[in-house]
Image (cartoon, rainbow, N blue to C red):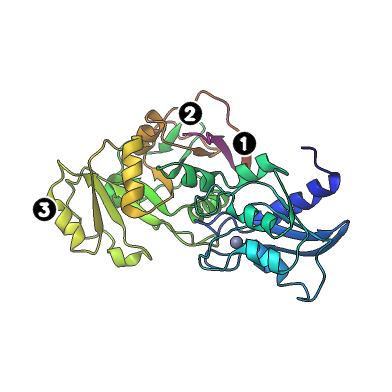
Amino acid sequence: MTWSAQDVCWMTRALELALRGRFTTWPNPMVGCVVAQGDSLLAEGWHRQHGEGHAEVNALAQLDPDLDLSQATAYVTLEPCSHTGKTPPCADLLVSRGLGHVVVAMMDPNPLVAGQGLERLQHAGATCEVGCLEQEALKLNAPFVHCMTSRTPWVTLKWAQSPDGFMDGRTSPAVSAGGWAITGAASRRWTHTLRARHDALLVGMRTWLVDNPSLTTRDAPGPSPRPLILTHGQTTRPANAKAASDWADVPVLVHPASSASQQALDTWRRAGYDTLAMNQSPMTPAWWADLRKGLGCGAVLVEGGAQIAQIALSTSSWNELHVLQSLKPLGKGLAAPSLPAEPHARRKQCGQDDLRIWEQTVR
Ligand SMILES: [Zn+2]
């Protein structure tokens, strides 16, 4: 299908609007909507916040309810929904407002919608066209599409390193030494916006204890992900470890079912931590599927340390890899994992630091 310049123009605008929700809509997709008649923009809207109005609702709310929309077109980046979730179906709303034409970038992979939204519109007499800037729309919501079509969560792996390949200037930092930030404030903000796009954040026990981390999104809009601590289940909780109540969402110790020490785990449980016993080897597809089933997390950010990053790489567990690199060599320290052989997909400057991003959407 060939699209007119006008269609491409309005859908481009709808995608721009959708992107505004990137830190606040997860686990919902980002969606934008433009209502236009020929060259004239009538209204626009986007899904701002999980649990609140969809893009179509926000766009149509700007228009006089008596306005004749039979000659207008609604451009929506995702098939309008057909199910009643937190809001009534958008397909019904478009029908009730008498929209004559609807152009959709991509079909909704959500099994609750999957074609039914379009069917309702067509049944009511609206002309519908699908696929305008489809690749761009699929890319925008790749984590959502992954979650709707796979049992495993979307996984982002992230670490920071020096240009000579060290994650920390010390080879084995003492627990009491605290974290070592080798990248700057702009990188920290980037990390926080990345966290806002994930339900959970996975670190190793050592990182949890050494960094005593505040794994939050304080420099970004959007909620903080739930902390998950990957552990053998043998570590007793040190008296100075933070209490579970320091986090908005209770941290979870993810441990092997068979070899963990219940005594050690009890010391964490008494401080309010949750535990999740796993039967599979860490970061295998079955392990990820169990993690998602057990905790309901559709997107997980893996933040460290070196050993965990290495497991994620060797099991090809990641969909996105973000490597932040500082300017200053460290000379020695804790070695970062080797970077993937394939070239990075994107590059971005974060203050003085260099960010490279690898992407594999199919995992
Ligand atoms: Zn909707």
Of labels 1 and 3, earlier in sequence is: 3
Amino acid marked by disc 3: Gln
Task: Relative to 327, say whether 7 is above or below.
Answer: below
Q: Identify residue for label 1.
A: 346
Instruction: Say which residue appears at 26% left-offset and 37% top-offset.
Output: 280
Task: Provide residue 29's location: percent of width, then percent of height.
Answer: 56, 54
Q: Identify residue for label 2.
A: 339
Instruction: Say which residue appears at 70% left-offset and 43% top-offset.
Output: 131
Is 359 a magenta residue?
yes
Marks 2 & 3, CB-CB < 8 Å contact: no
Amino acid marked by disc 1: Arg
Q: What crowding class fits label 1: few (fewer than 14 Cα within 10 Å), some (14-19), or many (20 or more)?
A: few
Q: Nearer the viewer, residue 28 or 104?
A: 104
Of labels 2 and 3, earlier in sequence is: 3
Amino acid marked by disc 2: Leu
Task: Provide residue 349's location: percent of width, then percent of height.
Answer: 63, 42
